[in-house]
Amino acid sequence: MTQSPQRIVSVVGARPNFMKLAPLVRAFAARADVQHVIVHTGQHYDREMSEDVLRDLDVPPADYNLDVGSGTHAQQTAGIMLRFEPICEALRPQFVLVYGDVNSTVAVALVAAKLCVPVAHVEAGLRSRDWSMPEEINRVVTDRLSALLFAPSRDAVDNLTAEGVPADRIHFVGNIMIDSLVRLLPAARRMGARARHGLREGGYIVVTLHRPSNVDSPETLKELLSALSVLAADTPVLFPMHPRTRARVRTLGFRPTGQLRLLDPISYLEMLSLVASSRLVITDSGGLQEETTFLGVPCLTVRPNTERPVTCTLGTNRLVAPRRDALLDAARNGIHLRSGGQVERWDGKTAERIVAVLCDGERFE
Ligand code: UD1
């Protein structure tokens, strides 16, 4: 008699979740013993923030879309919980997989845990110890609720162990974002986004800024835009803007000068293509800190701390204060190259390991 497949529900909602989901979509598709159901919360809904990214990653349309949209943290979290609960109850999966540290992650973990459906957290154990960031709250709460914790790095394993998580729940599987990067880098290079933008190899800077701490205060945003304007006097600076940032820059009435190019959000492949050939990345994103480390591209992270310390200790990342002069100093003097791909288990095989844990009971210590 054949056994019925185990049902695994993945829930994603925001742009950085999608690169983490894609490798598992492929890995589960290769298993006859898994029924993989995808739920999109609708936390991100603009075409450039969701549909375009999912298309680049070959992720099929979600089985359920909760259409939650934007709101305050409470509105968004509660909205996802209310809409996910009946689906989770009806599906009663063996596992609910949640990704990263966005509001969708914690909302779904709360619902599933209370329905006694085991939660598995992909990208568990990262800690900035900065409770002013909503993501830190989301990480800690999600990990506390999770039955299985998939850690991307040794420091994440150590954080979980120090918090008292039993060792048999923690699996050091590596960084799943790197799976997507490894698979799509050749296509990204072939696409030649650099040439299309008329740029030289290693001759330009890529910028992304979207954290409330950087873009919601007009003073801070002005400092950062001022530094970018100085850099753009002699180097092309490409700045694809998150919708939040675009709105704040518009409110300031800021007009770019020199070679500063303010762009709409760009697709995953185009971003990868541009970053891989850039001289420097300036960002406050979590994913870019990791991607630049893998690629060996210098990265300045405009934040006082990072939950991804290996990108600083082993990789190309450096933290910088959100001040004009600090950013200019760092951009001019701080460029340090290292070869990419040197973090343990950031090797494109993380999804395979996760499936081996979920389906075959393997352990990764
Ligand atoms: C969220 C995550 C953050 C992640 C980021 C990646 C949380 C708490 N934060 O932040 O960790 O780094 O995603 O992008 O979950 N908006 C649009 N269109 C969209 C989505 C958002 O216009 O498709 C605008 C809305 O004005 C919204 C604002 O962006 O209010 C913020 O969106 P939200 O999803 O709440 O948080 P992010 O800043 O995107």
Image (cartoon, rainbow, N blue to C red):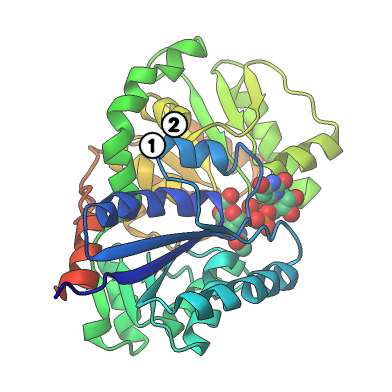
Q: Residue at x 70, y 42 (%)?
A: 243
Above-or-below relation of 181 to 151:
above
Question: Where residue 321 appears, x then y in whole percent?
Answer: 58, 50
Q: Which mark is residue 298?
A: 1
Q: Residue at x 45, y 19 (%)?
A: 193
The answer, for residue 31, to whether it is visible in the render is yes
Q: Is residue 121 left or right of residue 217?
A: left
Q: Quadrant of residue 228?
A: top right
Marked residue nearer the N-terminal end (2 or 1): 2
Question: Where residue 313 appears, x then y in whole percent?
Answer: 30, 55
Q: Badge 1 local density, few (<14 within 10 Å), some, or many (20+)? A: many
Above-or-below relation of 18 to 333:
below
Front residue (pair 229, 238): 238
Q: Quadrant of residue 34?
A: bottom left
Check if mark 2's residue and mark 1's residue have beta carbons within 8 Å: yes
Q: Residue at x 49, y 80 (%)?
A: 112
The type of residue carrying mark 2 is Leu
Residue corresponding to mark 2: 280
Q: Secondary structure at mark 1?
A: loop
